[in-house]
Image: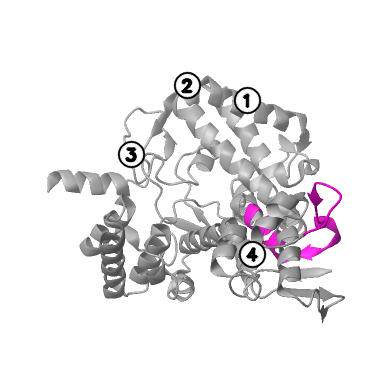
Amino acid sequence: MEFQLLGPFEARHEGRSVLVGSRRQERCLLSILLLQAGHVVTTARLTPHGLYVETRHDGYAVDPGAHVIDAQEFLTLVRQAAVTGDPGERVRRYDQALGLWRGPLLADVVDDELRDRLGGRLGELRLSALEQRAEAQLTMGLHERVVADLTPLAPELPGRERLVVAQMTALYRSGRQADALQLYRHTRQVLVTELGIEPGTELMTLHDRILQGDPRLDRPAAPLYAVRVGEEWLPWSTSGHPALEFCNTYAGWGGPGLPGSDWLRSYSTLAVWAGHMDLAEDRLVARLLKQAQQHPDEATAALDEARGFRTNLYACLTDPEDARAFKAVAGLAQDAARTSVFTRGEDGLAHWRLSPAAGLRLPVLATAHSAAELLADPRRLTIRTCPSEDCGWLFLDQGGRRRWCSLATCGSRRQQAVGA
C-alpha cells in the first residue's frame, strides 16, 4: 500500500486509488498510526481526538517497511539533504522532499487545530527545508529560482527571517533592489506591530548592505581567478604545493564565508582537481567520475570527508601546536600509506600512487599523502597565510619576503584602502 498524507488523504494499491474507511474518523485514526509508523501509538494517545478504540493491548503500530508513506519519505529525504555536501545534490533532494507536499497535511481529514497537534514537526521541517534549499540555490547562483519559489511565501511568513533573507538576497541579485527593500519594510512592520520586536541582526545587516550596494552581495557569473578544467572551475594555483592548493579550494578562511567561497561544490570538482594537481591520472579521474554517478551516496560521503580533512589540514599547517588537527591529518595519511603502490610513471621515474582500490576516497587520500610529505619537509616552516579575510590562502615563502599570496589582489585592495 502507498499512503499520501502531505495534502488530502489518499491510499493507493498497485498504483490505483482505493477507499480506506468511509468515515472521517476512520481515516483520521489510520493517519495518526501512519504518521507514527514504526512506533506504538497508545490508546491514551488516540482517545483525546474523540475516537473510541477497542484494544486488548497497550496500543497499535504500523510497520513502515510494509507500506510507502509520503510523510516518511519526506523525513528520509530531508535527513539525506541535510548531510549532503554538494549544493546541487542537496537542492535535488530538497526538491524531491518538498515535491511530496500537495497541500496542508491531511487537508480533508483534520482541522487546523488537530493538524498542528499531529503534524507540527512536519510543518516545521517543511519550512526549514524551504530555507535550506533556497540557501543552497543561492550558492549555485540560482537566484531566479529562489525568487520564483519564495515569492508566495516570504511575505506571509515574516517570522521566518531566514526565508526573508534568502528572498531579499535573490531579489537583489536579480536586479530588483526596490522589491528587496519593500520586502524588508513589510517584514519589519509585521514584526513590530504584531510581535513587538525588531528584525534580527542578520536581516538588518542585509538591509544595510543592500542600501550600500555592497558588491559582495553579487555572486559573479563565473568565479574570479579561476581556470576551466573539463567541466569544472578550479582556483588558480598560487601556493607551489598540492597540499596547500587543497586548502586554497576555500577562500576566506579568516572571515565569514562569502558566496562562492567554496570551490569544492561537488565530487566531480574534487576528482578533476586531483587530476589537475597530478595526484591522479586522467584515466583514473574519468573512472572516478563514472563511479560517482553510479554511487552518489558514496561520492557525497567522500566529498564530506574531503572538506573535513581540508579544515583539519588548514588548522595543522597554520598552528603547529594544534595536536588534534595533526592527529586527524596523520590518521588519514596513514590510511593513504596503506593504499599506496610504488610504480613507474610515463616520465621513467618511480612514484608513490594511490591504488584504484581506494575507490571514491582516492582524491582525499592522495591529498593526505601529499600533506604528509610536506609536513616532513623543511619547507613546512616557510608556510605563510595571506592576511586578508577575503583570502586566507596558504603559500610557501622560502625567501622570507612575501606578505600576500601570489594573487596579491586582496593585499592591493587593503593597501589602497589604507592609502585612501
Q: CA distance from mark 4 to mark 3?
A: 45 Å
Q: Which residue is mark 2?
A: 320
Numbered range of the magenta stretch: 53-79
Tags 3 and 1 touching, CB below 8 Å: no
Q: Few, some or many C-alpha atoms within 10 Å of disc 3 (few <14, some 14-19, many ≥20)?
A: many
Where, by quadrant of the figure, is residue 260 drawn? bottom left
Depth order, front residue of 403/368: 368
Where, by quadrant of the figure, is residue 48 drawn? bottom right
User: Magenta span has 61?
Assistant: yes
- Mark 3 and mark 2 lie on one chain; the one further toward the N terminus is 2
Q: Which residue is mark 1?
A: 330
- Mark 3 and mark 1 lie on one chain; the one further toward the N terminus is 1
Tags 4 and 3 touching, CB below 8 Å: no
Looking at the rendered image, the disc whose residue lies closer to the viewer, 4 or 2, is: 4
Residue 214, percent across and down?
26, 59
User: Magenta span has 77?
Assistant: yes
Amino acid at dot 1: Ala
Q: Which residue is mark 3?
A: 404
Residue 231, percent across and down?
59, 64
Q: Residue at x 46, y 76 (%)?
A: 148
Amino acid at dot 2: Pro
